[in-house]
Image: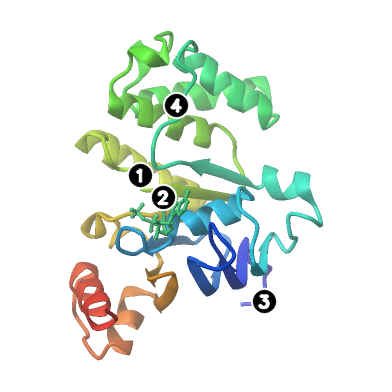
């Protein structure tokens, strides 16, 4: 493939202190229209990779480009090409659901008509119609997670970075989220998704990156990872178990 990757990470090492890196020589690419599953045990480094992509942490070594440019080369282009769903909801208690979505839409420069159409679609999809004017402090845990997801999806960036989004969502919410991610993918967007719910993402992601102790220990389609491990036909969960047990 000769097109510019939406996201390219090369030789990334980084962490929370210089003498103890958490990430070791990470390389990965996300192409336009791809959904990539980033999987690993607790503490493997998934969120730390995402913090580096978002520019919340700076690499100790290596480079990260979004649409071919680093954050230093084009800060505005870099950030407007990204949208993020964090693992835990971070909301303003005194703002309503609608205000959160509106605020995010303005920050991304979404025009009024697009905002109206998308926000109606998202509130229906996530069953939040009757909560749009509720203060976020009055929402359930799963509803707060839905607000984060709706905020991330109100803009139409090239890349969605989504950190373990399913926790707290009810089965209908999980299905709506998966279906919506497929819609985004069809429209050409790329998604980097981390999750522990391997049976759920197995059939949705195009490729997987398996992270263990801050290193990429396997990558590819399910069939490619299975073939490389000499165990064709295994499910993602079985393969993951074999890989991390073997890599201990
Ligand atoms: N703020 C922090 N300060 C210091 N170390 C941290 C901090 N956040 C994470 N770490 C460490 O970095 C390593 C990677 O953590 P990270 O949060 O990236 O894991 P993860 O793969 O996202 O795990 P999980 O599945 O539990 O969300 C762990 O050893 C963790 O203890």
Mark 2 or mark 4: whose residue is earlier in sequence: 4
Asked if labels 4 and 2 touch by Cβ distance under 8 angstroms, the answer is: no
Relative to 75, residue 109 above or below = above
Q: Position of residue 228 (x, y in %)?
A: 33, 88
Q: Nearer the viewer, residue 191 or 85?
A: 85
Relative to 183, residue 62 above or below = below
For label 2, the SS is: helix
Q: Which residue is at 49% across, 19% downward?
A: 92
For label 3, the SS is: loop
Q: Nearer the viewer, residue 195 or 137?
A: 137
Q: Which residue is at 69% across, 59% downward?
A: 67
Asked if labels 2 and 1 touch by Cβ distance under 8 angstroms, the answer is: yes
Mark 3 or mark 4: whose residue is earlier in sequence: 3
Q: Position of residue 168 (x, y in %)?
A: 26, 35
How would you rate the neighbour count of disc 2 (Cα within 10 Å): few for under 14, some for 14-19, many for 20 or more? many
Relative to 26, residue 124 above or below = above
Mark 3 or mark 2: whose residue is earlier in sequence: 3
Tell me how far mark 3 sits from mark 4, CA to CA: 35 Å
For label 4, the SS is: helix
Q: Residue furthest bottom?
A: 230
Task: Check disc 3 and report the residue beneath it.
Answer: 2
Mark 3 or mark 1: whose residue is earlier in sequence: 3
Q: Nearer the viewer, residue 99 or 206?
A: 99
Q: Which residue is at 42% across, 27% downward?
A: 147
Task: Check disc 4 and report the residue beneath it.
Answer: 121
Mark 3 CB within 8 Å of ligand 1: no
Task: Check disc 1 and report the residue beneath it.
Answer: 179
Asked if labels 4 and 3 touch by Cβ distance under 8 angstroms, the answer is: no
Tell me how far mark 1 sits from mark 2, CA to CA: 5 Å
Label for residue 182?
2
How would you rate the neighbour count of disc 1 (Cα within 10 Å): few for under 14, some for 14-19, many for 20 or more? some
């Amino acid at each position: 493939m000769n097109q510019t990757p939406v996201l390219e990470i090369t030789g990334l090492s980084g962490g929370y202190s210089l003498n103890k890196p958490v990430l070791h020589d990470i390389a990965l690419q996300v192409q336009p229209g791809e959904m990539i599953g980033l999987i690993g045990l607790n503490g493997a480094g998934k969120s730390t990779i995402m913090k580096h992509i978002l520019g919340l942490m700076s690499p100790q070594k290596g480079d990260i480009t979004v649409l071919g440019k680093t954050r230093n080369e084009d800060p505005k282009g870099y950030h407007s090409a990204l949208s993020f769903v964090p693992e835990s909801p971070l909301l303003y208690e005194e703002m309503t659901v609608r205000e959160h979505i509106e605020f995010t839409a303005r920050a991304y420069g979404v025009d009024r008509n697009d905002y109206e159409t998308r926000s109606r679609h998202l509130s229906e999809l996530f069953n939040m119609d009757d909560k749009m004017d509720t203060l976020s402090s009055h929402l359930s845990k799963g509803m707060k997670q839905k607000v984060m997801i709706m905020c991330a999806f109100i803009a139409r960036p090239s890349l969605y970075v989504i950190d373990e989004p399913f926790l707290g969502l009810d089965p209908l919410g999980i299905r709506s989220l998966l279906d919506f991610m497929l819609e985004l993918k069809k429209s050409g967007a790329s998604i980097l998704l981390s999750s522990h719910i391997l049976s759920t993402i197995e059939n949705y992601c195009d490729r997987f990156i398996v992270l263990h102790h801050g290193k990429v220990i396997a990558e590819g389609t399910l069939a490619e990872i299975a073939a490389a491990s000499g165990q064709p036909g295994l499910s993602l969960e079985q393969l993951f178990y074999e890989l991390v047990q073997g890599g201990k």
